[in-house]
């Protein structure tokens, strides 16, 4: 049992040593306007405003249009090479007596 008590004391000492003391405001880092408000280059536009210039599109519009195009290409290729066959309905032949 002495080892459990020693381990508990060691954990408590480690947690006390990790307590951070308040820092002066001069040492606190502030990011300011480092977010999305700081534009570099021309502003991005919606894909429907200039559909022939993908370099001007917003990133999320480019991703949506690209994924839609790839999906259409893959689905069209699948339909072309399979002959456009869907589920086949079996025709029941009436038994002639």
Image: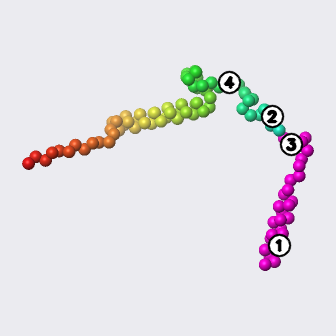
Prevalent SS, magenta region: helix
Which residue is identified by label 3? 28
Q: Tell me how far mark 4 sits from mark 3, CA to CA.
A: 32 Å
- Which secondary structure, mark 1? helix
Residue 71 as seen in the image, left or right of residue 40: left
Q: Which residue is mark 1?
A: 6
Residues under labels 3 and 1: Cα distance?
37 Å
Q: Residues within 10 Å of mark 4 (few under 14, many from 20)?
A: few
Give neighbour class at mark 1: few <14, some 14-19, many 20+ (Cα, 10 Å): few
Q: Are marks 2 and 4 in contact (CB under 8 Å)?
A: no
Residue 80: name its quadrant.
top left
Q: Which residue range is magenta in the image?
A: 1-29
Mark 2 vs mark 4, CA separation in Å: 21 Å
| Tag 2 near tag 3, CB within 8 Å | no
In what element is the residue under mark 4? loop
Residue annotated with mark 4: 43
Indicate which disc, 4 or 3, sits on the residue closer to the N terminus.
3
* Picture residue at 83% right of the left edge, 65% below the top: 12
Q: Is residue 36 left or right of residue 70?
A: right
> Which residue is pictured at 56% across the width and 23% down the height?
48
Percent from the top left, x then y, of residue 36? 72, 32
**Separation (CA) of disc 2 from disc 3:** 12 Å
Which mark is nearer the camera, 4 or 3? 3
Residue ID at (41%, 35%): 77
Q: Horizontal placement of 41 versus 19: left or right?
A: left
For mark 2, give the secondary structure. Answer: loop
When the figure is inspected, residue 23 is found, relative to residue 33, above or below; the finding is below
- Quick check: 24 above or below 63? below
Placement of 14 over or under 69, stated as above or below: below
**Mark 3 surroundings: few (<14), some (14-19) or many (≥20) residues within 10 A:** few
Query: Marks 2 and 4: which is nearer the front?
Result: 2
């Amino acid at each position: 049992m002495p080892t459990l008590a020693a381990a508990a004391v060691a954990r408590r000492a480690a947690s006390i040593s990790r307590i951070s003391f308040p820092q002066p405001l001069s040492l606190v880092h502030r990011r300011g306007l480092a977010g999305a408000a700081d534009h570099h280059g021309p502003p991005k536009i919606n894909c429907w405003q200039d559909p022939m210039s993908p370099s001007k599109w917003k990133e999320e519009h480019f991703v949506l249009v690209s994924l839609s195009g790839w999906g259409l290409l893959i689905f069209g290729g699948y339909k072309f090479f399979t002959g456009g066959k869907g589920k086949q309905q079996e025709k029941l032949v009436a038994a002639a007596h």
